[in-house]
Image (cartoon, rainbow, N blue to C red):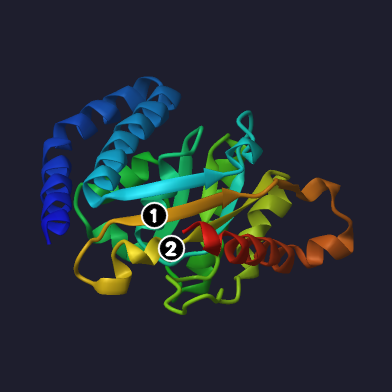
Amino acid sequence: MIRLVLVAVFVTVFLIVSLPIQFVEFLIGKVNPDVKSRSSLAIVNWAFRVVLFLSGVSVTVLGEENVPKDEAVLYIGNHRSYFDVIMTYVRVPRPTGYMAKVGMLRVPSLSTWMKYLHCIFLDRSNIKAGMQSILNAIEKVKSGISICIFPEGTRNRTDDALLEFHDGSFKIAEKTGCPVVPMSINNAAAIWEDHLPWIRKAHVVIEYAKPIYVRDLDREQKRHLSATVQDIIRTNYEKNKELV
């Protein structure tokens, strides 16, 4: 119970205290958007690291050297926990936007930080809006912003199984030529979702596979890109079970 209380208090205080910081970031963005992106990244990274510390989360990271540092990438990962975002975001080497549910726009202060961090809000009930979200993500990548998507479409509540990936996510890589980085996450639900509402100490394993460069694939390989990435994530997920 104490971990839940500590996290809840910290997040609440951070979102309130950071309101004037958001205004400063807004002013910085008017002068230099790139500086705003990187300073917002640093601020939220600090807050996320505090949340992980208070939650008692330890993370083993494999293959981090596979993540390109000099260009925007498309991260594709399996999704079992809200903590997936926190644990992976503190490791991104450049500004990175996450695909998020449109409902997050209703959360004051948090939604502002998400906008500053280039997050894209997806309305899955609106096909036209969904297509626009993919187009927005393509423009982000073209401008040098990485994008992270969990293409199962929602948090997977099924143990040891991946939901079918939504192919639309991969249009971002196809249209921009950015590398796709498959990302497997083991044991994330043990932090919170497996025993709601309590937060418990847990060990998580994250592995970044070697990037896939869509421009190097032939037509047939491009058609099966979603299945290929899902197979890589599933293989690493099964392999890393013994490390948890």
Q: Amino acid at mark 2?
A: Asn
Horizontal and vertical percent for residue 35? Answer: 40, 22
Query: Which residue lies at the image location 52% right of the left edge and 69% below the top edge?
Result: 128
User: Quick check: marks 2 and 1 in contact, CB under 8 Å?
Assistant: yes
Q: Residue furthest bottom?
A: 158
The type of residue carrying mark 1 is His
38 left or right of 65? left
Residue 38 lies in quadrant: top left
User: Is 39 or 171 nearer to us in this picture?
Assistant: 39
Q: Which mark is residue 203?
A: 1
**Quick check: 32 left or right of 5?**
right
The numbered disc on residue 187 is: 2
Task: Answer with mark 2 or mark 1, whichever residue precedes in sequence.
Answer: 2
The span from disc 2 to disc 1 (Cα, nearest Å) is 7 Å
**Left or right of 8: which side holds 164?**
right
Q: In which quadrant will I find the N terminus? A: bottom left
